[in-house]
Amino acid sequence: MSVSRLMIAPFLMAASMVVIASPLSAGVVIESVNKHQMHSKVSIEATRARIDSGSVDDYLLMDLASGKTYTVNHLEGVVIDLESAVVTSEHITSAIKDRMLPKVELLKQGEGPVVNGFATVHYRVMINDTIHCSDEYLAPTATENKMVKNFVAAMARGSDGVDAIIMASLFGEEQMCEAAADIVDDEYAEKGLPMRSVDSEGLVTHEITQINQHSMLTNEEMTIPAGYELLSRAEMRQRLADRVKPVQEQIDAMPEIDIDGIMQQQRDMQQRMHDTSKELKGGLKTGFE
């Protein structure tokens, strides 16, 4: 997940993180909006982070040290371990990396605008010197805050940019740019927090609207709710499949509908209506002549 898109993606936290801590802890709250005008909020403290993407039904939590991420789902009363997706195997990666891995660069363009109170530096994400993916406006002073810097670094560690761009090289430019965004994540902890992202067409795709570096976060909002069951993605998928299975069995047990017969009945009815209309018109014509 790209740091430049970190505010639009939904996060969560391991059972080991459910600890009894002080009721309040100092933190940072970052609010942002994406190109669809969807608002997100990231709450960060020393060891944990939470991402709310606007839904009251779920949110994400992250252990900044391990990078472990989980989804808290209130509707199901479960916590889903968002283990890393399967990446390209090591021997395949090493065999094709030299041939297929394009050059991805975050090129400095100069000073950027002040974005919601933060001075920025303008960078351009380029692939092979020819593909212009996006323009990123980074705020160096934002990552001087240790909690923000830890969060950005943890997000970068969770990106699978190299494997993604190797596979994306087989497809189109758009997929390559998405993978390139994951690769340049590694540079944000040192260069600055992405305050604004603009695509190659000039559309603002992400912007941080507010950063509160003096927030107080409750232990309750930064931990997994008590009693929630911890599941893997596979276990959650199986649970949903089991729930749908009885419905599917009922559908399968229903008698087969004779579509051809129904269509023929409709054709016969239309023909009868046509014949009746023709007879009426013929009668009227005969009666008036």
Image: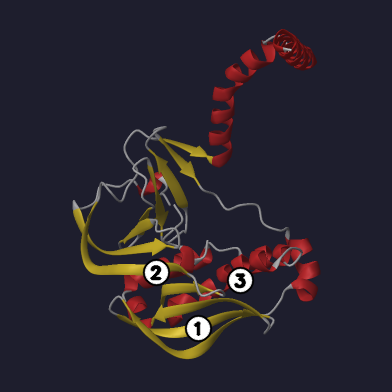
Checking the image for residue 180, the label placed there is 3
Label 3 packing within 10 angstroms: few (<14), some (14-19), many (20+): many
267 relative to 205 in the view: left or right: right
Quadrant of the rendered image containing residue 71: top left
| Numbered mark located on residue 123 in the image | 1
Q: Position of residue 88 (x, y in %)?
A: 71, 58
- The reply to whether callout 3 and callout 1 are in contact (CB within 8 Å) is no
Q: For the residue marked with disc 1, what is the amino acid?
A: Tyr
Mark 3 or mark 2, which has the lower sequence index?
Answer: 3
Quarter of the rendering occupied by the C terminus: top right
Mark 1, residues whose alpha carbon is within 10 Å: few (<14), some, or many (≥20)?
many
| Residue 271 in view in this figure | yes
Asked if 134 appears above or below 243 in the picture, the reply is: below
Extreme residue toward the front, this view: 289
Instruction: Give the residue pinned by disc 2.
Output: 207
Mark 2 / mark 1, whichever is N-terminal? 1
- Where residue 19 appears, as percent x and y from the top left, is 30, 47
Tell me which label, 3 or 1, sits earlier in the chain: 1
Mark 3 residue type = Ala
Q: CA distance from mark 3 to mark 2?
A: 19 Å
Say left or right for 254 vs 197. right
